[in-house]
Image (cartoon, rainbow, N blue to C red):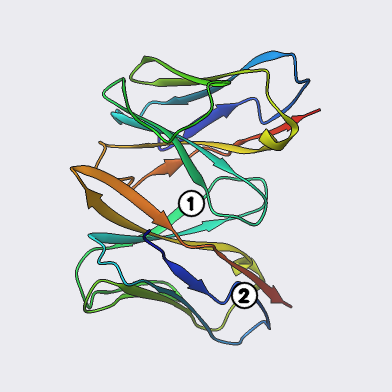
């Protein structure tokens, strides 16, 4: 199993809503990542979890709150988002936090904030 | 600020033609990765190059890492419509024991039948 599974695939939410994005992998990887990608741009790193501990937060606004319940799961809790937060949110995992060498990406969640 | 300049940003060619995509930087990378991404999907890792001067082949795709590990190229021979997609390079660096990926801006490739 070399899959990273993200749910939902699409999400439309209002600026006052609270929602969560979910990511799951069963490859035994100990590093997991959240990226944000705008159209025609490369992915931008948001958070890195290494051995279930948050190791990097790239100055992401607090309306994005990551959570790593266990080594296979990674969540991104969303609250009071702005329309400019609309983007493709990508989860990735790698064996460890040696950069994202041999990283596997999920299909992404297409988020639209209205 | 570390930059990885990727060119061209957009390329539209006929099936059967050859093409090369370049990624250049003034920084030295410990490794460099090439990804392909289709619309609405996540990037898929194609190859990782680690050693200066390394050449890797993946069917019709040839990847090269520069001798100084500052640049890389992707060459596609006899391009097929199925090669259409966004190609991204990403260089790995280390700063204060933190590994980072520096991403190129991407090359949108369209292969016309």
Q: Which residue is mark 1?
A: B44
Please indicate whether residue A15 sits to the left or right of residue B21 in the image: right
Question: Which residue does the image show at 73% across and 13% down from the upper left?
Answer: A17
Residue B95: x %, y % from top left? 23, 49
Total count of labels: 2
- Name the residue nearer the viewer: A64 or A28: A64
Q: Secondary structure at mark 1?
A: strand
Give the mark, 1 or 2, whose residue is nearer the N terminus. Answer: 1
Disc sitting over residue B80 in the figure: 2
* Quadrant (top left/top right/bottom left/bottom right) for the C terminus of chain B: bottom right
* Label 1: few (<14), some (14–19) or many (≥20) C-alpha neighbours in 10 Å: some
Spatial separation of the CA atoms under disc 1 and disc 2: 18 Å
Question: Which residue does the image show at 52% across and 37% down from the upper left?
Answer: A106
Chain under disc 2: B
Residue A12: x %, y % from top left? 77, 26
Q: Confirm whether residue B63 shows in the render.
A: no
| In this view, A4 is above or below B110 | above
* Outermost residue to the right: A114
**Occupied quadrant, residue A73:** top left
């Amino acid at each position: 199993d070399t899959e990273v599974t993200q749910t939902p695939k699409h999400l439309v939410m209002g600026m006052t809503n609270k929602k969560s994005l979910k990511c799951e992998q069963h490859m035994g990887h100990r590093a997991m990542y959240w990226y944000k990608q705008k159209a025609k741009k490369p992915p931008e790193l948001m958070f890195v979890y290494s051995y279930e501990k948050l190791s990097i937060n790239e100055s992401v606004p607090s309306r994005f709150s990551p959570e790593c319940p266990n080594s296979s799961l990674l969540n991104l809790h969303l609250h009071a988002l702005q329309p400019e937060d609309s983007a493709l949110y990508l989860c990735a995992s790698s064996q460890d936090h040696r950069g994202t060498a041999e990283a596997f990406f999920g299909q992404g969640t297409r988020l639209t904030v209205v | 600020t570390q930059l990885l300049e990727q060119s061209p940003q957009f390329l539209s060619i006929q099936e059967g033609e050859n093409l090369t995509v370049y990624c250049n930087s003034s920084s030295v990378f410990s490794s460099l990765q090439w990804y392909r991404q289709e619309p609405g999907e996540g990037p898929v890792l194609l190859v990782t190059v680690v050693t200066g001067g390394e050449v890797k082949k993946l069917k019709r795709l040839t990847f090269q890492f520069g001798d100084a590990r500052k640049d890389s190229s992707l060459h596609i021979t006899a391009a097929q419509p199925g090669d259409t997609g966004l190609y991204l390079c990403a260089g790995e660096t280390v700063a204060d024991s933190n590994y980072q990926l520096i991403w190129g801006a991407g090359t949108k490739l369209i292969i016309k039948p």
